[in-house]
Image: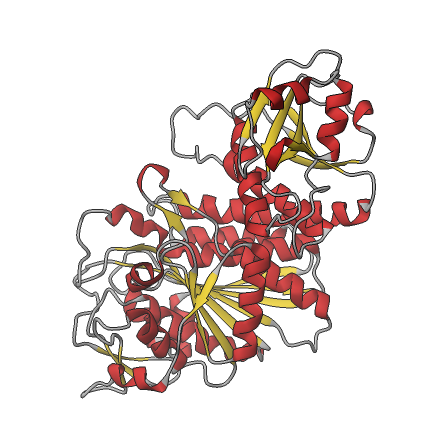
Amino acid sequence: MDYLLANTPLESLETECLIVAVFNNQKLSPAAQKLDSLTGGIISNILQRGDIKGKVADTLLLNYLPHAAFKRALLVGFGDADNLTAKAYRKALSAAAKSLKSSHSSSAVCCFVENKVIGQDTTWKARQIIEAFDAPFYQFNDCKSKANDKPALSSLSVHGLTDTDAIQSGINQGSAIAQGVTLARHVSDLPGNICTPTYLAERALKIASQYANLSAEILEEADMQKLGMGSFLSVSRGSRQPAKLITLEYNGANKDTQPIVFVGKGLTFDAGGISLKPGAGMDEMKYDMCGSAAVLGALQAAAQLQLPLNIVGIIPSSENMPDGDANKPGDIVTSMAGLTIEILNTDAEGRLILCDALTYAKKFNPDVVIDMATLTGACLVALGRVPSGLLGNDDTLCNDLSAASETALDSVWRLPLWDEYQDQLKSNFADIANIGGRDAGTITAACFLSRFTKDFQWAHLDIAGTAWKTGDAKGATGRPVPLLVQYLLDRANAA
């Protein structure tokens, strides 16, 4: 879809659908007032009938507008005009996008930048328009013999007569984030027999080939063996698919500038290994690589925006299968850091591949390291599907991520990482056990990772509850790409 700036008066626009705001008590936005004037008071008459009240996320599609150049108009409720919050703004945008999708319009102009949103500027408002309108038009058709009919909409314009540079900046940011989210959703939605570690490696190489300052390197199992990644390789032993360690490097700043490092869990399918998962819902374990998909999406967005930063993406990728050579409960393996690990549950494999990837991250002399992983079902139990879990060893980094999450509307909730929890990982036979029992599963998983992050500032995002939806709406969400890109934008602005 094309996203454009429309900076001409409404009476001069040509579009199939004009999207305007109404507020509580049937108050019209400036664009809606202009539309009302252009249509001889039709909007006012409709409001007087009570067809739309102006509550947040109310929508009303008008299919006939005499005396106007627009075939349709979409009225969208935003609640209190003087107390419009960021979340209410995004909720109304999402409702508008869904209504527009069903309207069969091929083009539309959105007039929501003029709405005042508490604490947010023009660029943010324009960016949210692009992100919200892009999301419902995503379709996964790769594996269907007959693809679903594509929605008619081919272009969306953001209207504004002033502050047009800020609007264009928001469009650019929103488009890059939306494309990063789409990439992450698409790769995640692919089945495990297509999206293998080799496929992820090839996809990373393809992305890198599209940008001059983005490069990719793929390490094979023999390379990892030489590095001493015994923990990572112990997971891949049970699979016929060879493991890959994928690195993407984006160089947008001076060579001496320490990079921001993203590490994404890339389990392209997780059967649980010998500690086999229950059959019900196991198909969704193709989503155990959503952390890696987010790294790909975030690096692509950074390259598209040409951010003045150095960024490294590291993706340890494997399958976790119950082969005769697979890890067994009670096995002891040696990590790249030299710590020995007693494997008490082979289904706690994500931390086994991440720990070696985090150790590998030290070679890049990172400024900060942020890993993201569908790591624990305990996070879903604790927090549901609204926020991702956030833990880390540095308050500044965690606070920066929390602030970015609020701006991006990609929420996180910080959990404690106290020394008292480390005792649950004690082993009688190795330096550390890979699980800490039923209590505080998300925290003890992060405690495990923290043993390998003592040399740098580190944060961990547990996205087990937010990376995909289940049920009738089953599919990847693309989170936390918006959060990661917002963090990068904040860092770029600070630089």
Residue placed farthest to the top in the image?
Answer: 66
Question: Which percent across, then down, holds residue 308?
Answer: 72, 65
Is 325 located above or below residue 183 in the figure? below
- 314 to the left or right of 174: left
Q: Nearer the viewer, residue 402 or 85?
A: 85
Residue 14 visible somewhere in the drawing: no
Question: Which percent across, then down, holds residue 397?
Answer: 55, 75
Tell me which residue sits at (19%, 56%) in the image: 277
- 7 to the left or right of 247: right
Instruction: Count the labels in the image.
Output: 0
Tell me which residue sits at (71%, 29%) in the image: 32
Q: Nearer the viewer, residue 347 or 215?
A: 347
- 98 to the left or right of 62: left
Is 358 located above or below residue 188 in the figure? below
Residue 491 visible somewhere in the drawing: yes
Question: Which percent across, then down, holds residue 123?
Answer: 71, 51
Tell me which residue sits at (59%, 71%) in the image: 260
* The quadrant where residue 374 appears: bottom left
- 423 to the left or right of 22: left
* The quadrant where residue 354 appears: bottom left
Q: Nearer the viewer, residue 482 or 289?
A: 482
Quadrant containing the C terminus is bottom right
Query: How is colour applied across the structure in the image?
Result: secondary structure
Quadrant containing the N terminus is top right
Question: Which percent across, then down, holds residue 265?
Answer: 41, 62
Q: Nearer the viewer, residue 478 or 360?
A: 478
Tell me which residue sits at (74%, 50%) in the image: 169
